[in-house]
Image (cartoon, rainbow, N blue to C red):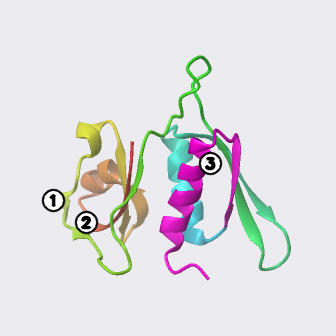
Amino acid sequence: MVTDPIADYLTRMRNAIEAKHRVVEIPCSKLKKEMTKILFEKGYILNYKFVNEGAYNQKIKIALKYHPVTKQSAIAELKRISTPGLRKYVSVDEMPRVLNGLGIAIVSTSKGLMTDKEARTLNVGGEVLCYIS
């Protein structure tokens, strides 16, 4: 049993990147689906697919993105911010900027999961889940 599914998601991605894997499989949930969609929209992953292996056994297959010449991953760092033991909530005024705008922070708001930039535009705060750069 996993007590922190978001940390598990980030760790599986981090381990696959370190091992230079092309594809990583992650157990599915609504939150993980939304995080995957954000990563795809922002260009951090190549592609993704939701796979049903039975009624309760869904997985997300994520194709990781690497530079064709240098073989470096598009994701340099995945960092969990808000943990089950210490939640990190911010208002729109305190919204973090990752690498001075080059990275993204994924924020869980009352209007759904979004990046820090989108949250500033919609003028909403929320729980900062992770930083991706």
Q: How many neighbours does mark 3 have within 10 angstroms: few (below 14), some (14-19), or many (20 or more)?
A: some
Does the magenta segment cover residue 6?
yes
Q: Residue at x 26, y 71 (%)?
A: 88
- Would you name the residue on which mark 1 appears? 94
N-terminal of the two: label 3 or label 1? Answer: 3
- Residue 125 is marked as 2
Q: Secondary structure at mark 3?
A: helix
N-terminal of the two: label 3 or label 2? Answer: 3
- Would you name the residue on which mark 3 appears? 16
Q: Amino acid at mark 1?
A: Glu
Q: Amino acid at mark 2?
A: Gly
Q: Quadrant of residue 57?
A: bottom right
Q: Amino acid at mark 3?
A: Ala
Q: Nearer the viewer, residue 17 or 38?
A: 17
Q: Is residue 55 left or right of residue 69?
A: right
- Magenta segment, which residues? 1-27
Q: Residue at x 33, y 81 (%)?
A: 85
Q: Quadrant of the N terminus?
A: bottom right
